[in-house]
Each structure stands twice: as structure tokens, then as C-alpha cells.
């Protein structure tokens, strides 16, 4: 399986005007192609787009590969919008995709040269991050890049790709995601308990505090907050802090889970939480937590970190996992949190849930491929298919660079 990772790097140049002109032309002509094909009763093929727009785009100063990327981008936008029954899209962001023929990266000098209009080459100085060095150790292959201009800054998104061979798992790791911790249970391929534990975090609690501040500001200036720049900036500042805290928590959790799974060479079993928010009807306090709870992002980060390590991952239904005894027999509930197992041990509902998830993952593995077999590819639930693609296609994952302290 091929896995792709995208890393974002800030870039600077003494004269940004040529690259701004290129990005604006790239956006405007992509919009032109979108407008031209929007009224068609079918989605045109790349061959049809090339025959219709290639010469026109070349006359505007674009290189051959620029034309190909513009045509492909316009087709993707129209196809996705019509699939969702949306209105004609209007492109606003200044972004451009570039093939390897249209850029030259010098890792030693940390500079990037990109081709813009009329075969002019612009040099960008990159703000390098030390973690990027691992992508140039020979395991990863640099693919296309995306150049973007946002908030007076130039950003470059590098896409790396490598082949991943899944390891044969020796254990199964069930993971239960909660508001304030991640609970895991690891069993061997015979169903025997190996270890269990919890990874605590307070990211949701801290993010919720900033959300409360935002709501207080909106209530205090109920009529003016949309129109006064200072109030909008205060709301944006606190919202950004909440977002960064949640992103940092997702990376912290997924990194810990991947490290533990790698240590035990485990197949990871996650809950299929598709449409969770639609199914839950809780209290006002619970719903506020649920609205901030980035469980899909946590699962997504765990998924791609596991894929990079060559660890298989699957999803099972979480139904009744915290109410069913993993040892057989009946559970005795002390309260909402604590449970007495049939053997007399007292554990939390989270432990029981993660234990049952691991057992369901083991059952799925042995049912599909036999007790000694191995599953090469395990699909994610519906909500993750757009991000990770289907079998034989590259798995696209992301890398968030700017985070705050936990």
C-alpha cells in the first residue's frame, strides 16, 4: 500500500509579486474552466478538457504541466460540487499545484525554485523544520507540491509518498476513545489478556474553557460582535487557541497509541463512530463537549500513524461494548464508571469497552482470514473514505506543524 504525507513549510522571497501574479492567474483560469464546463450535462474527461483548453492556457503563459493541473483541478471541483448538489463554485483561495517538472528543491540550501508564468523561475527561501529531514532519508519519495498565499504569507505543502508493507500482528489492541482519556486493552491471538492502560489528556477541558469565553463575549455584545473588528478578533483569538489545543491533543494521543501498538506489534481496533452526533441526545453540557470532541480527527491521526508504521487497523461496531462481559457471565455495575467482572475484579467501563473491542477485532481477523492468516487491507468507515481512498490508491494523510502546548 502507498502512503502519502503532506508537510507545510513557510516560504519567503524578496519580491513576491511574480508568484502572486501567477497564483491569481492560476485561480482565475481555473475558475474560467469551471464556468465553461459547469453547464454541460456530463463531467468531461481529461482528454476532452485538454483538447478544449490546452492551447488557450498555453497562450496565457502557463507551462504544459500547469495546464494539466488547471484542467484536473477544475474537473475535480465541478465533479465534487455536482455530486453534493451544490451551486456553481466560486474559487477564492490563491493556490497552485505543481508537478516535479515545475519545481526544483535544494535540501542543502533550503531553497525552492518554482516555474511561474512565461517560464520565469522564482526562488523561495524555506523556513525549515528539523523533523522534515526524516522524509529525505531515502524511504520517502517527493511528489507534487502545493503553493498557497494566505494572510500575507507564502506556504508550500510538500507531498511525500512511500510503499508500506503491513506487519503480521502478534497482538490485538482495542481502543476506547473518551472525553478525557484513551483506554486500551491488548490481547494475544488466542484471546488472552496481555496488558491494559489509559492515556489521560485534558485538551477537551481546556478547549471548552475557551469556548465558554467566546460565548460570554457573544452574549455581552449580542448585537455588535459581528460588526466590530476588535470583538471579532478577540473571538477569533480564543477560537484559534481552542483549535490548536485540540490539534495538539490529537497528535499527542495518536503518537502514544502508535508507540504502544508498535511495541506490541498489534493490530489496532477502533470504534466505528460514524454519525455519532446524530445518534446522541444528551444533556446541554454533554452536547457542548460532544460538539468540540474531535473523535474523528483522533481516529484519523491514529490511522495514518499506524499505516506509516505498517500496523494494520480495523473498525468494529461499539454497540454494547461497555455492557458485555469480556469473560462471559454477567457484569455487576457499581455506578456509571465502575464495574465488577465475573471473576471479582473491579474495573472501569472504559476497560471493559476496549477489551470487547479487541475481542471483536480478533473475531473479525480470524473469521476473514483464519486463525493463522493475515489481513492485507482493512477499510475505514464511510466518513474516512474520502481521506484515505480505496484499495490500490495512495492513502493521503496530513501533517500539522503549528501546535500549542498541551
Image: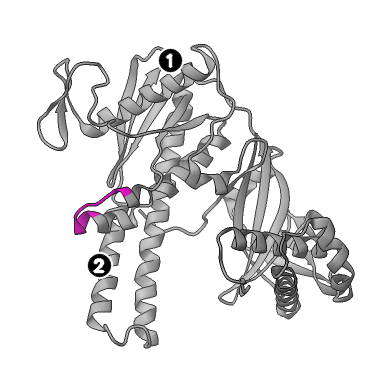
Q: Is residue 363 left or right of residue 61?
A: left
Residue topped by disc 2: 212
Q: Secondary structure at mark 2?
A: helix
Q: Earlier in the sequence, mark 1 or mark 2?
A: 1
**Which residue has dot 1 on it?**
189
Residue 222 in sight: yes
Percent across and percent down for residue 270 are: 41, 35
State which quadrant residue 134 falls in: top right
Q: Is residue 149 left or right of residue 122?
A: left
Q: Is residue 280 magenta?
A: yes
Judge by depth and name the residue closer to the eye, 141 or 338: 338
Looking at the rendering, the stretch of residues picked out in magenta corresponds to 279-286
Q: Name above or below for residue 98 compared with residue 55.
A: above
At a point 35% along the width and 28% down the height, the residue shown is 357
Residue 5 is one of the magenta-drawn residues: no
Q: Dot 2, crowdedness within 10 Å: few (<14), some or many (≥20)?
A: few
- Whether residue 63 is visible to the viewer of this picture, yes or no, is no
Residue 382, which numbered label? Answer: none
Residue in the foreground of this view, choosing between 34 and 170: 34
- Residue 72 x, y percent position in the rendering: 74, 59
Q: Residue at x 77, y 63 (%)?
A: 71
Q: Which residue is the extreme one toward the front?
A: 41
Residue 204: horizontal and vertical position, in percent? Answer: 30, 54
Please provide percent x and percent y for residue 339. Answer: 15, 28
Amino acid at each position: 500500500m502507498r502512503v502519502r504525507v503532506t508537510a507545510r513549510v513557510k516560504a519567503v522571497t524578496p519580491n513576491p509579486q511574480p508568484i502572486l501574479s501567477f497564483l491569481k492567474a492560476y485561480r482565475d483560469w481555473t475558475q474560467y474552466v469551471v464556468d465553461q464546463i459547469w453547464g454541460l450535462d456530463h463531467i468531461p474527461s481529461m482528454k476532452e478538457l485538454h483538447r478544449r483548453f490546452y492551447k488557450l492556457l498555453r497562450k496565457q503563459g502557463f507551462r504544459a504541466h500547469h495546464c494539466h493541473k488547471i484542467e484536473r483541478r477544475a474537473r475535480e471541483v465541478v465533479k465534487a460540487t455536482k455530486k453534493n448538489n451544490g451551486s456553481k463554485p466560486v474559487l477564492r483561495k490563491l493556490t497552485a499545484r505543481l508537478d516535479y517538472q515545475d519545481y526544483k528543491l535544494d535540501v542543502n540550501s533550503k531553497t525552492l525554485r518554482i516555474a511561474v508564468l512565461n517560464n520565469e523561475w522564482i526562488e523561495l527561501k524555506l523556513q525549515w523544520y528539523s523533523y522534515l529531514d526524516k522524509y529525505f532519508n531515502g524511504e520517502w519519495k517527493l511528489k507534487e507540491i502545493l503553493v498557497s498565499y494566505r494572510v500575507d504569507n507564502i506556504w508550500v505543502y510538500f507531498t511525500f509518498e512511500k510503499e508500506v508493507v503491513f506487519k503480521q500482528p502478534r497482538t490485538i489492541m482495542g481502543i476506547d476513545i473518551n472525553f478525557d482519556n484513551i483506554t486500551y486493552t491488548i490481547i494475544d491471538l488466542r484471546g488472552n489478556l496481555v496488558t491494559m492502560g489509559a492515556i489521560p489528556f485534558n485538551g477537551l477541558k481546556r478547549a471548552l474553557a475557551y469556548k465558554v469565553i467566546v460565548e460570554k463575549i457573544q452574549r455581552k455584545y449580542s448585537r455588535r460582535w459581528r460588526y466590530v473588528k476588535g470583538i471579532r478578533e478577540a473571538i477569533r483569538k480564543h477560537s484559534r487557541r481552542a483549535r490548536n489545543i485540540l490539534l495538539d491533543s490529537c497528535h499527542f494521543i495518536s503518537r502514544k497509541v502508535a508507540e504502544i501498538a508498535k511495541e506490541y506489534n498489534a493490530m489496532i481496533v477502533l470504534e466505528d463512530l460514524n454519525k455519532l452526533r446524530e445518534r446522541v441526545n444528551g444533556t446541554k453540557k454533554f452536547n457542548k463537549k460532544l460538539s468540540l470532541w474531535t473523535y474523528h480527527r483522533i481516529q484519523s491521526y491514529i490511522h495514518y500513524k499506524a499505516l506509516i508504521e505498517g500496523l494494520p487497523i480495523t473498525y468494529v461496531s461499539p454497540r454494547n461494548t461497555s455492557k458485555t462481559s469480556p469473560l462471559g457471565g454477567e457484569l455487576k455495575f457499581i455506578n456509571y464508571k465502575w464495574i465488577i467482572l465475573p471473576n471479582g475484579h473491579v474495573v472501569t467501563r472504559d476497560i471493559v469497552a476496549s477489551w470487547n473491542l479487541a475481542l471483536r477485532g480478533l473475531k473479525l481477523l480470524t473469521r476473514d482470514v483464519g486463525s493463522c492468516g493475515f489481513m492485507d487491507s482493512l477499510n475505514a468507515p464511510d466518513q474516512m473514505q474520502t481521506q484515505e481512498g480505496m484499495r490500490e490508491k495512495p492513502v493521503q494523510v496530513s501533517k500539522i506543524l503549528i501546535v500549542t502546548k498541551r
